[in-house]
Image (cartoon, grey):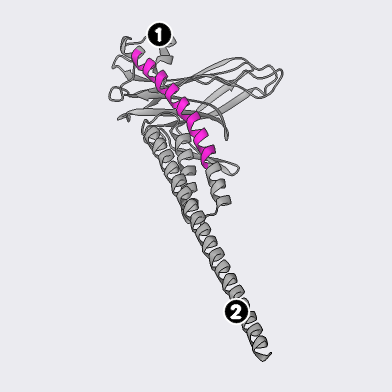
Amino acid sequence: MENQKSNSSLKAIILILALLLLGSLFYIFKLTTDTQNLETKVTAVTTEKDNVLKDLQALKATYVAAIAENTSMSNELIAEREKVVQLMAQLEKAKGDAGALKKYRDQYKALEAKMKTLMVEVETLKGENQKLAKNLDSTSVVLQDSKNYNQVLVGQNEQLSKTVEKASKLSVLNLKTAAYKQKSSGKQIETDKASRADILKISFTIAENAVAKSGDKNYYVQIIDAKSNVLGDKETVTFGSQSLTYSFIAKVKYENKTVDVSQDLPGKSFEKGTYFVNIFDKGELVSKSSFTLR
């Protein structure tokens, strides 16, 4: 009888130990599986992070190459490149999880879409420049007709719309820029060569406006060379919280009729490359253009 009780107790103990062993084995298996899953997720996150960084690096390289073309879009391209650089810096510091990486991937896709749009514009601009260069090569160096001013422009001359009905704001139109060689006789010969130029001629039109206030008007003309230097007077004026460094002031007597304005900026040793011309009415940019000296 006692032997039967002893055998029953022993079986119970063995059963309990077996259950504990099975439980331990199940726990170890689950722990191992969870660890492997975690390692897989960490590896996937790390791989995705590296992939996004590589994509951003390629995006940055595209902008660097486009900026090297030195087109009139350089400022916009530089701004977009800086956005890419900032995102790369944020991603490198991020600890990273699937949710965060998706956010960075989405930001990359947005930057990539913007890049593709800008590259189309750059290619269009380069095509226009090539056409312009071809036209210049086939044209006589001496251009006596003012209608040919547009041949020295790199980009499209922008025109501001005429003032809407009875609007008091004046419109600046037909901004044109060209370089000239001043002969001893006083004759000016148009040129697109930096080594020959000693005068930059800036001309524009102020549109007729019957309801605008008549009187003296000052327009601040800013000319920036290929090395981002402001030419001319280099004087600085402040409008509220904004300051403006200008090349010269075009003073106009406005009597509510169309006025053509033309002014020369003498100089020497002009740099080769693209020049930018901005016209300000006080602190407001009212017209802009660009041209190239080779």
Q: Secondary structure at mark 1?
A: loop
Among numbered discs 2 and 1, the one appearing first in the sequence: 2
User: Who is closer to the viewer here, 11 or 69?
Assistant: 11
Farthest bottom residue? Answer: 2
Residue annotated with mark 2? 14
User: Who is closer to the viewer here, 40 or 10?
Assistant: 10
Coordinates of residue 54 in the picture (x, y in percent)? 42, 44
Residue 130 within the magenta-colored segment of the rendering: yes
Name the kind of residue labelled 2 in the image.
Answer: Ile
Q: Quadrant of the N terminus?
A: bottom right
Up the image or down, 238 lies above or below 275; here it is: below
Coordinates of residue 148 in the picture (x, y in percent)? 41, 11
What are the residue bounds of the magenta stretch?
108-134
Residue 209 within the magenta-colored segment of the rendering: no
Q: Main secondary structure of the magenta part?
A: helix
Q: Nearer the viewer, mark 2 or mark 1?
A: 2
Question: Does residue 270 appear to the left or right of 146 in the view shown?
Answer: left
User: Who is closer to the viewer here, 122 or 52?
Assistant: 52
